[in-house]
Every structure is written in C-alpha cells, then in structure tokens.
Image (spheres, grey):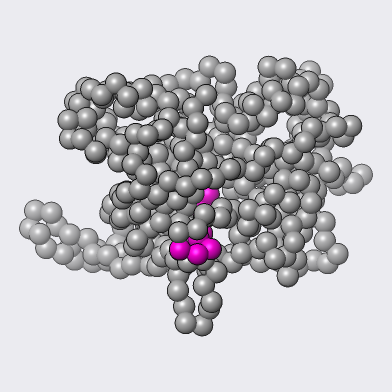
Amino acid sequence: MNATTYFYVRPTDSLFVRGNLAFGDSGEHGTGLMPPPPSLFAGAFRSALLGQDVKHLSSFLSQGRCSDAALEQCLGTPRMPGEFRITWLSLAGEPSAGALPEPVFPLPADLLMLGMTFATLEPRAVAAGVQSAGDLPLRATLVSAKQEKPNGGTLLSARGLHQHLSGQRPEQAHGIETKHLYQRDPRLGIGLNTDAHTAEEGQIYTTEGFAFSPKSAGMPAKFASTGFLVGIDGVAELMPAEGVLRLGGDGRSALYRRVNFTPPAAPGLPGKSRRFRLLLQTPALFSQGWLPEGVVRQNDDSYHLQGDGFDARLACTALGRRDTVSGWDLFQWAPKPAQAAVPAGSVYWFDEFDGDFGKLAAWVSQGLWPQNPDTLQHSRRAEGYNRALLGAWN
C-alpha cells in the first residue's frame, strides 16, 4: 500500500470553482462551489507533475503515457490511472504562519447548529399512523427541545468532528464560521468576440469566487492563512516539497507545501451494539444511485452491506441534495460524462453488524468502490470520490 503524502494548499488569489448549473446567457450569474470537488486537486497536482519536464508533458499528450518510468507508475494512462490517488480533502487553516494546518469540515447531514448549540439527527422509528416514503426501517429525526431554523455558515473543527464520529455531540466551541475560512468574491465579466477582439454587446455576467485568508478590521483573524489539506497516494518524492499550482477557473495560483498530518482514527469495535455510521467525506458516485456499493436488497426487502468478511443492515440515511459531477478531459479534449453524486456529508447508519470490523475499516479506507471497478470508476477513484469516514452510532 502506498504511503499518503499530505499537502497544505493556499490560494494566493480569489478561487473560482464552477458549479454545474447552466450558465452562459447574458446577465446570468455563475455560482461557485465550495468546498470544491476532489477532482479539482487531482487535475492540479497531476498537471504539476507533468509540467516539471516538457518532454514528459509532450509524451503524455501525444501517447497517453509518460516516457519516465516513475511518472508512468504514478499517473498511468488516461483510461487506467496508476498509483496516484486523492485520499483526503478538507478545508484547512494555519493557526500561525508555518504551523501545522488544522482541517475544517462542513457539517455532516446529521448535525445542525440551532441557536448557539449543536443538535443531531437520530434514527427513529416512524410513529404509528404516520406515512413516510422510503424503504428503510428508521428515519433521521431532529432531536431538539424546541422548533427553530438551523443556522447556516457553520463549519466543524477537527476536534468537533472527532467528537461527532465518536458518537458525542460536539461542543459549541468547535463550530467555526465560514467567514474565518473564506468570503464570497463576485466578479463582473464581459463576453468577448474572439475574431474582432471586441466586447460583445449585452454579454455582461457575474461569476462567484472565494477569497481565502480573509482579513477584516472589525474581525480578529482566527487563522493566519486558510486553504485546503490534500492527501495523495503514489506521489512519494515525485512532487517537490513546496511549489505553485494552477488551481480552478482562469488558472489562479496557489502555493502548496508538504506537511505532516495524521487523519482521525476509526472508532473502536461496534461491540454489543453492532452499529456504526458511514459519513461521506467527498461526493460519492454509486452505481445504485443513493445506495453505497455492496448494499444488496434482500428477500425480506431489507438492505444489507455485504463485503469480504462482514455484513450489516442499512437502517437509516441522511442525504443532502444530489450533486452533479462532470469535468473536462484534457487528453480527449472533451467533457467528461455528467454523473449524479451523493453529496459529501451524507450519513448512513448500519446495525446488525456481523463479521470482522477490521475488514470493514480496511474497505472504507480504500474508498467505497466495487471490487472490480470499470474504467470510468478507476478514473473517478483516482480523483478522490467515494471517500468516507467510519463513526460510532451510540
């Protein structure tokens, strides 16, 4: 198994990450996407690897493989990636200049900020006489003393995520407002006539960017700088310890440096409860839509996760609004297929676990992919989709 190398990536200018909503007519607004999909960083780092030597870049563009043996082992081919794989992606901030960056996470789907405290969604049976869509035995239910709308713009610190994965309710102090990580930065654009090199009449639009490391006279800075924490398998010593990336729309620059980071460990064995949660860290592309790979409907209409050495019943889910994942294939110079994705932060509750929990943890650590992925799944796995974290269900 390849060791994971972690990098702290800090945008030096506003970052533009296009969403998948239709955009292009005059007067329209191009919405941004934050946090970005993992494929953004896969493309940036793979391009940086190839761009170190023009001969390697030329060989890959013309033949679909690298002339250098080490790079070929890392990157493989456009149809069959090599050892390169995004295994970790999160927002991050430096407490002080040069310090180890701290990961920061969007709130999971089963966690809300109500007023000044966190509240959780918990699996509950549907009350008698209440009709509810869905085939699962339990429904994610808000547990709160009073009715109120959840607060937006809240992120979760690494310590808060550890508490949540351990089955505890995070403390209020572990909530971080998005304004400490980034601020929205809309920009005005004008369509150009490429032949006449003049402005197109009426082609005025806005796009949404994100300014990182925000500074404000009226707000104390929580971090010296902010950006992303990215973990990559297969790069070893091929990537310099620090450098510059082209990141996002318009190829804006971002600085990166190698850092030492240890991801949160999986919780202990389910024990007598025989229950656990799966939390999606990145968007997931499942062949069965919202159902994770390996989940099979049984004769009694229950859903079971069946793997090599383990089995568990899917009891409940908390899913966000469906994402659309696409992108641009630079080698084929064509758009990638648009695919429906389960959004990051979605949560799956499993009970009636039977088998070896270590084998379950090993499967989750490799990404929620089938045993024999097809060509497109191989490519998307290298880009960092289907990454998940194990959590306790207390």
In the shown orientation, is residue 233 left or right of residue 134?
Answer: left
Dominant SS of magenta comes to: strand
On screen, 64 above or below 217? above
Which residue is outermost to the right? Answer: 128
Which residue is outermost to the bottom? Answer: 218
- The answer to which of 114 and 268 lies nearer the viewer is 268
In the shown orientation, is residue 134 left or right of residue 1?
Answer: right
The answer to which quarter of the image holds residue 97 is: bottom left
Magenta range: 89-97
On screen, 5 above or below 180? above
- The answer to which of 236 and 280 lies nearer the viewer is 236
The C terminus sits in image quarter: top right
Q: Residue at x 43, y 30 (%)?
A: 234
In the shown orientation, is residue 209 left or right of residue 281?
Answer: left
Q: Is residue 127 visible?
A: yes
- The answer to which of 290 and 40 lies nearer the viewer is 40
Q: Is residue 288 visible?
A: no
Decide whether residue 90 is among the magenta residues. Answer: yes
Picture coordinates of residue 107, whole percent (x, y)? 64, 54
Decide whether residue 51 is among the magenta residues. Answer: no
Picture coordinates of residue 378, whole percent (x, y)? 45, 25
Picture coordinates of residue 249, whole percent (x, y)? 32, 53
Q: Residue at x 52, y 24 (%)?
A: 1
